[in-house]
Amino acid sequence: MASVIQVANRALTKLGSARITSLGDDVKAARSITSCFDDLRDEELRAHRWSFSLKRTSLAALTDVPAFGWDLQYQVPDDFLKLDMVNDQFPGAILENYIGVETIDYVLEGNKILTNIDAPLKLRYVARIEDPNQWDVSFREVLACRIAAEICEELTQSNQKRQLAWEEYGQALVRAVRANAIERQPVMVSDEAWVIGRI
């Protein structure tokens, strides 16, 4: 069973630091990791389209409507980190936009999606996954490397170790993104985007 402490200790091992038993330990390493763990986890989840973090849901329209410009608004889920797809359409290039005709179907403002699309609104999004058992093993390694790189200076005061930690993070990220891409079905690019790319 994977745990936050295992990921934390993996990061500390990379720096040659002593392991901890809890993020609540009254030691510098635990305090350093606690101060950045949640933010770095969420940042790494947002940075790529990890298969394990994608969720689908249908949203009901809110009773309050936008002040102007749109007819409806929808509240994103509490664990929402990044928009992936709305009503089976990926955000992407649209030919009409290139020629000056606005055809935007929705906008994300704050924690709401504003649109004229009737309910229920189908949404696929990158979710905040807090349980390490749901993370891909490659993602756990990426996060451990990222934490090690972030806290290296504070714990070791070594620029050389810090540089090596960032290099290891980069290598782990390449491997994880490659594995994640291989397991996913290819996304077809629209003809409009293909046309725009050649103009």
Image (spheres, rainbow, N blue to C red):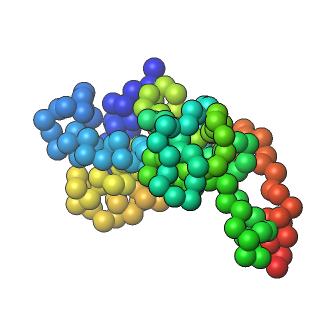
- Residue nearer the viewer, 130 or 20: 130
Q: How many marks?
A: 0
Percent x, y of residue 57: 60, 31
With 116 as the anchor, is 167 left or right in this view?
A: left
Percent x, y of residue 77: 49, 36
Which residue, as the protein is rendered here, is positioned at the far top?
1
Percent x, y of residue 54: 60, 37
Where on the picture, by quarter, is residue 166? Answer: bottom left
Where on the picture, by quarter, is residue 100? Answer: bottom right
**Residue 48 is at least partly visible in this image:** no
Q: Quadrant of the N terminus?
A: top left
Residue positioned 17% across, 44% down in the render: 28
With 181 as the anchor, is 126 left or right in this view?
A: left
Percent x, y of residue 3: 39, 27
- Residue nearer the viewer, 121 or 163: 121
Taking 99 as reference, is 30 above or below it? Answer: above
**Residue 199 is at least partly visible in this image:** yes
Q: Quadrant of the C terminus?
A: bottom right
Taking 59 as reference, is 46 above or below it? Answer: below
